Amino acid sequence: MSFQNPVFIPGPTNMPEALRKACDMPTLDHRSPLFGEILRPALAGVKKVLKTDRAEVFIFPSTGTGGWETVITNTLSPGDKILAARNGMFSHRWIDMCQRHGLKVEIVETPWGTGLPADRYEEILTADTNHEIKAVLATHNETATGVKSDIAAVRRALNAARHPALLLVDGVSSIASMDFRMDEWGVDAAVTGSQKGFMLPAGLAIVALSPRALAAVEAARLPRTFFDIRDMTKAYASNAYPYTPAVGLLNGLKQSCDMLLGEGLDAVFARHHRIAEGVRAAVSAWGLELCAQTPDVYSDTVSAIRTPDGFNATDIVTHAARKYGVAFGVGLGEVAGKVFRIGHLGSLTDVMTLSGIGTAEMVMADLGLDIRLGSGVAAAQEYYRNEEVLSSRKAA
Amino acid sequence: MSFQNPVFIPGPTNMPEALRKACDMPTLDHRSPLFGEILRPALAGVKKVLKTDRAEVFIFPSTGTGGWETVITNTLSPGDKILAARNGMFSHRWIDMCQRHGLKVEIVETPWGTGLPADRYEEILTADTNHEIKAVLATHNETATGVKSDIAAVRRALNAARHPALLLVDGVSSIASMDFRMDEWGVDAAVTGSQKGFMLPAGLAIVALSPRALAAVEAARLPRTFFDIRDMTKAYASNAYPYTPAVGLLNGLKQSCDMLLGEGLDAVFARHHRIAEGVRAAVSAWGLELCAQTPDVYSDTVSAIRTPDGFNATDIVTHAARKYGVAFGVGLGEVAGKVFRIGHLGSLTDVMTLSGIGTAEMVMADLGLDIRLGSGVAAAQEYYRNEEVLSSRKAA
Amino acid sequence: MSFQNPVFIPGPTNMPEALRKACDMPTLDHRSPLFGEILRPALAGVKKVLKTDRAEVFIFPSTGTGGWETVITNTLSPGDKILAARNGMFSHRWIDMCQRHGLKVEIVETPWGTGLPADRYEEILTADTNHEIKAVLATHNETATGVKSDIAAVRRALNAARHPALLLVDGVSSIASMDFRMDEWGVDAAVTGSQKGFMLPAGLAIVALSPRALAAVEAARLPRTFFDIRDMTKAYASNAYPYTPAVGLLNGLKQSCDMLLGEGLDAVFARHHRIAEGVRAAVSAWGLELCAQTPDVYSDTVSAIRTPDGFNATDIVTHAARKYGVAFGVGLGEVAGKVFRIGHLGSLTDVMTLSGIGTAEMVMADLGLDIRLGSGVAAAQEYYRNEEVLSSRKAA
Amino acid sequence: MSFQNPVFIPGPTNMPEALRKACDMPTLDHRSPLFGEILRPALAGVKKVLKTDRAEVFIFPSTGTGGWETVITNTLSPGDKILAARNGMFSHRWIDMCQRHGLKVEIVETPWGTGLPADRYEEILTADTNHEIKAVLATHNETATGVKSDIAAVRRALNAARHPALLLVDGVSSIASMDFRMDEWGVDAAVTGSQKGFMLPAGLAIVALSPRALAAVEAARLPRTFFDIRDMTKAYASNAYPYTPAVGLLNGLKQSCDMLLGEGLDAVFARHHRIAEGVRAAVSAWGLELCAQTPDVYSDTVSAIRTPDGFNATDIVTHAARKYGVAFGVGLGEVAGKVFRIGHLGSLTDVMTLSGIGTAEMVMADLGLDIRLGSGVAAAQEYYRNEEVLSSRKAA
């Protein structure tokens, strides 16, 4: 088991030294006042990262999937109708979860590689004059395809249709790495996990609910206990949990927020964009194409790269792991075998990224693809060395 | 925030150095074959600790509460009837969860401080000739009262009544510290967490299901996704998870099992018993009484100690934390203010326990209780120094 | 190998969590400017702990013994005469080192258990009208006997004799735990290590030289390279080292100073005194006596406890380690077998100390000494619970 | 302070995760039997790495420089004559140390960039018919120039001259990374530190003495105490130290030996050679030259790279640190400003090395050198992907 090379999967990401140390805590009595000194700043920090003053944040010892379940079980009731587009594996899974909880999902099938169809949403919502649709699902960043969607446009669609449905957003692979404006975009529920932009181990579901979403909690009739916002709200009032919290991860989250806000969110987002642009320059130099079809939907956290027809893209991932000890992501669902993915989020530098690009080149050459060694690296180098770095590098 | 003194709460427990290091892992690609080298031994180790060959183990990034929810949502359907005794805060909470999930609970109110009423169970089950009762809940160790129950007796009750109900057991504060015989006792579902006998941080729900419980999964109609055993089973088949696992904690669990099995389960249980007996000797020397009413129900993981009438036992906990930096447990529910609790499970030595007993003495003296300083310590010392230690002390 | 119980040796001491993390650093280029951000505050912090404005601090990847060698090789020349009292094992060893380096040592034999004979020093210095004596050695705290000496009195002796000899002080087991006033006492060289009052792993020799000592460096003709103050001075001018520094330990030292100064030196010293007084109360309750003969020389960092004639005190240490996993110190040199030692310096609480006292009681009872279990613990408890704590407890 | 990128200095090197954890130990009583369980395997492991059955190993809490001082003070006397070649900064420093300790050094000035002149040694030794020369110094790997010397040839020179002088070898930047055959080459003293091939933090001087060197210890009249082999020998006999050992580092050394021997020394050396060859391929692709003048002296642990006349090579190091957060080594002494150094020893992978090469390219391009981006990376990629890896990658 080699931990020497960075990982290039789209989460869990590489972890900064300081965050690993923050998580690795001795046992602290979670019923003592000391716990509040961890919980309060963690909650406040997440709010800042989400750019929200109005929402309440809830953190569960769980994962992003648990965050999704938190959102639907706390705001919806069996038989409720929801609207969702399927444009990748993670939007697909969320839809599946809704169906398994007895919700009726109006699915807008959307080509993998494109963003959420805000126009189509607007048509459907406008037609829904009885307001049967209770919620709209929106995956901000499709981790499977490397596609970013325009959440503000979805909000505009809701507004144009004068529709009261809740806007529920999966920000698992975007939040803390790409700009996310909960209040400005009128997001009612935002979901993420600890292991992506927050650069921590997996183990926390991070959920934020707007006042409108909170107002829906009491009436929501889907059964839940572990994920019940009501228990959490009551416990938070005395800086406690309804069960044993993951204290170390919460301490890590507190420090992660400090680190992100210390660097400056704009600098964090610019850094992710810069690193992603370097990867995209490499892809272009290789003569390959992204799964994401147009630049406006290019994700700054993960690139899904199409390989030539007849080539099994999954071989790249297997070979890279076996021969070079480097982890990339495989294609999922509809694009399985057709793409491999380079994750470029979290704790990463230009320099580390060069080694990922360089490894991908060796792997593709090994597997017989017509890739000139060093070509992608050179394209990324040229980009990186000429880009201004927004903030000074900080301790990590 | 002082981490110098041991904690004496009934979980999370003190953590061995080696387990903290096992949990504090760099990022590992959980889709790589390396993950199986962590998952497989962790699952196998838990089975050994539970003394089961037949059950399957499932581990969720969650807590014991999530484990309870896993068990009921995967084996029961809305409207199902279950049988449960309420003899403490944790049995109460499990009942509450069942009710919130639409189950009908036949509650046997049982005095706090006594064990589960197997006789009464037998009567009820015998009377239930239509087998409307689908499951029997049993809390092996009531953390709130320091009361251990006889699970084998509950099984005998089921057998005597020739009743097919599933036997669902909460072993959160017993498993890995006290003897638990899943197969021998005919337990159908066992639940625990990582932060008790396994001496790890909170963050894992550990669930084991017998073949009979597994057979019930497909028919169970309570909605679930995050906790769905079906998804987990499918993913485990390829050493994977349906979402991002808590790799570090799983690695810690693997090593915890190695540590427990290396010491020997009998030695582990004997150690917990010895340490607990010392605490009970101290309580007796103080002239105080346990909440647990008879020696057969004394818990080896936590002692709830009754304080004199008119005295607020919670003051002990507050004062100990503030003045001495030591964490004890407060009384919960029906015994709030009437007891304080000394947790004595997990990674603890006789020597560490003396400091907990000594601190409790200073605190009670400070608060005006008629306690002779050193009296409880002397009783524990006398006990500890004359007890044989089963196994040699091992690295931790 | 059990790391669960605290150690009660007179160094290395128990380490605070935060200092372990500060030492456990990834590789940092020690020739980069970042290194200065560690070195500078560490040097400045040590000066504050030593209460000196005038002295210069030098830190070697070595131990206290290396610190001694640094002092003599950098200030003296072969054949130089020095004055030293021998009242314990560590003063003995320093004398031995001087002799091995070709220095002539005038030794004042002093009963083990008493402090340095300032009066006798004054007589000798007054008689040395030719100022042949170039340096006076003084062991501030004799770790072998638990005896503290009055360094201010030694300075007064020098002044009374109007003698220019350098005053070289071994503060290995006093500095950062007991008051040390380098400037006020006119100390010319002070030596300590990282593993005592600074609560770090062993590996640093910490040396401070007064302007007078620094003035002696150029003329000193004892050979040295690794410990050469001249190389170190030149390197420090550019925040560098003449060889590879122990970066992690220096980072730990920086943070240790922050921690000590954050608590407040007076509070640190008061804490050590309080904990030591509790131990002494226990010794008295046991009916035993300290090796230190009078209260004015009682050390606040280590107690050497005399056992009854005919009893081998070393058995206590062996038995405590084997049966209870607790480390005490053996007697050394003249008092080998006659005393055992309880170290009570560094990162320790009243609560932890109770477990050390309680263990000593069990051990002595096991070995047949007439010790009433709990008696020493009770005496310490009575003392601790009535003592005011100077500063609030801080994170560690 | 960024710890994200690997370092490319010639030590301290990048540290494997497992070794950092081995070093980060709680306090262990170094006078307890447990200490022997660390010391013994560490000493035995070092002997295996040195390929010696006959030598004794001694480990000081110090650095390589302290190791040098140990060797000369324990085998030589003031006025003794020694033979040494000066072909770089580290041979220069060792000569300087000898002179400061009153030894007469016959210096063979040797061009920087070439290896030790065994022929010239043979002439001088042959001419020294009175055997006035007591020792021959040999720097196995000149870290300043990236030059490896042939120690076997120096031994042949001694043998040819039938000269009894001791052969003292500085293996600081070679041992554990490049083949070192203490017994076969007739090395009498070998010196290294913890922070190079052993991949640990700085803080240990590691010295091995042949039976002939050990025989010289008693007669050696240079003063020493901290570094005295006699005290160390006596203490080792009871698994102890004459002062406080650096227990955590020794534990790390034990585990480092396990790791190296587990991978297999041949595999370790082959790995270093492979990585070095990749770097050299890059240098060649850049059109630059190594300081090392001929392939037979190319070092597998560090490459010193000459930059064009008129260019200040130190700017590369400064710019790389400031703009890219990557540490390279500057030129020292005679080649200051003329070379920059890429360290490629210790815990490094092909993949990590690509990022170092890629960074060097960006830096040189930024500074106006005529370097084609990606050219060195491509050359290294081509080499790496076609090279067989000797052993399977192991946990680290």
Image (cartoon, coloured by chain):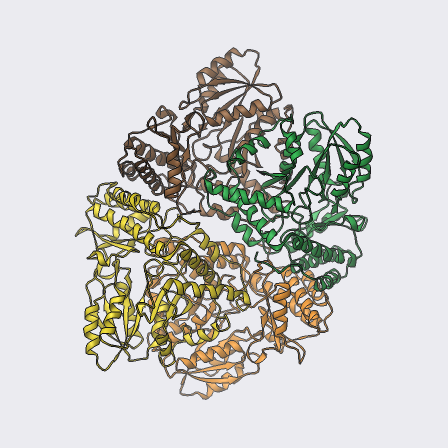
Chain colours: A orange, B yellow, C brown, D green
Instruction: Indicate left or right for C192 with B317 as reference.
Output: right
| x and y, in percent, of residue C162 in the image | 52, 15
Residue C57 appears in the picture as rendered? no
Say if D261 sits above or below C9 in the image: below
Residue reaching furthest to the left: B309
Q: Give whichever of B226, C326 is nearer the camera.
A: C326
The part of the image, by quadrant, that contains residue D283 is: bottom right
x%, y% of residue D246? 53, 40
Please report the residue visible at 47 percent of the width from the left and 77 percent of the height from the top: A94
Horizontal arrangement in the rendering, residue D163 relative to residue C236 (left or right): right
Side of A343 relative to A220 (left or right): right
Count of marks, rendered view:
0
Residue D126 versus residue C38: which sits nearer the camera? D126
Question: In the picture, which quadrant includes the N terminus of chain A?
Answer: bottom right
Horizontally, residue C137 falls left or right of residue D378, namely: left
Residue C38 location in percent, x, y?
Answer: 56, 44
**Residue D83: horizontal and vertical position, in percent?**
75, 33
Q: Looking at this view, is B195 or B39 the one in front? A: B39
Q: Quadrant of residue D111?
A: top right
Q: Which quadrant is home to the C terminus of chain A?
A: bottom right
With respect to residue D16, does C30 lie above or below?
A: above
| Residue B268 placement: quadrant | bottom left
